[in-house]
Amino acid sequence: MTAMMDTESVLDDLATSLHSGRIARVPDPSPTYVSRRTALGANRTDFQVLDYARAHHYNVLIEGPTGLGKTSAVIAWAARNSKPFYAVSSNVAIDPSQLFGKFVPDGIGGFHWQDGPVTDLVRHGGVLLINEINFLPERISTVLFSLLDSRREITLLDHDGEVITAHQDLLIVGDLNPDYEGTRPLNKALRNRFAIQMSWEYDDEIERQLVRGASLRELAGLLRRAQHDGEVDAPVSTGMLVEFEQIASGLGLDAAIRNLVNHFPTDEERQAVTVVISAMLMNLESDYADEGAR
């Protein structure tokens, strides 16, 4: 009997050690993230909206084009509040066990249950971001339905049907870019599970803080107008502008321009972009000509 109890104690200690580590991690703070004002609640900031959502257990949906800081906003909020964070990458190859957990060898001839990152956050709290939620496979979204509605729980069918009620400190955010090729409109039943929905566009105030060159910001406006008019398909994101200045500083203006043009996939688009850049070249040279020599 004593030997059996000792064995059980060892197994319990092993299981405890295996389960003690958190899968989700608190992200490092970003020194360059600029919080934006939203159109919600007397022009509240993105952080204020996320504070409110967490306090009231509301899910948040952020919709907008690529590269304007949707993901960065959630990461920055998690870092500021020291919350464990995990982002679900919505792609067709993802397997539910990668997110919710599975049985794995315990190293002593048996198996133990290992939570996935989503289950980890549901149990212990933190920030769950569902990237490009309009790409999310149905086999994943159907498991999340009960977590996203008023029940706020998930059922682990592979773990004897265990039902886990979400931790009080769990914030769930989804983001999407409606313009990505291959996307589909977000299922109404899924969209309605997000009580707070924000639509973001490129923000002049933020870009003035992140991009010092007025000529580059003007160029971005011209290229975005060309995209709106159907002359080019590729968007010009805030991130691309930041990268332009970094490349100009390290490799020179010519390299930065060539790299920007290469973001556009077809010869027709590159020609159209080159025409726009040529019209702005003198101003760009004034702002960036000496960058590569630094």
Image: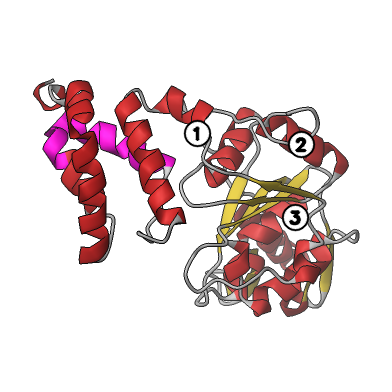
Quadrant for the N terminus, please.
bottom right
Q: Is residue 78 magenta?
A: no
Circle 3: element type: helix
Q: Which residue is mark 3?
A: 122
Q: Which residue is mark 1?
A: 28
In the rendered view, would you say 241 is above or below 286? below
In the rendered view, would you say 239 is above or below 204? below
Q: Residue at x 61, y 28 (%)?
A: 80
Circle 1: element type: loop
For the residue pair 143 and 217, the one nearer the viewer reads as 217
Side of 187 relative to 90 (left or right)? right
For the residue pair 184 and 173, the one nearer the viewer reads as 184
| Residue 3: % across, % down | 71, 66
Circle 2: element type: loop
Tag 3: residue type? Val
> In the image, which is nearer the foreground, mark 2 or mark 1?
2
- In this picture, which residue range is highlighted in magenta? 238-255
Examine the residues drawn in magenta and state their main secondary structure. Answer: helix
The span from disc 2 to disc 1 (Cα, nearest Å) is 27 Å
Q: Are marks 2 and 3 in contact (CB under 8 Å)?
A: no
Q: Residue at x 72, y 79 (%)?
A: 158
Q: Which residue is mark 2?
A: 40
Q: How many residues crowd around disc 3 within 10 Å: few (fewer than 14), some, or many (20 or more)?
A: many
| Residue 252: % across, % down | 13, 32
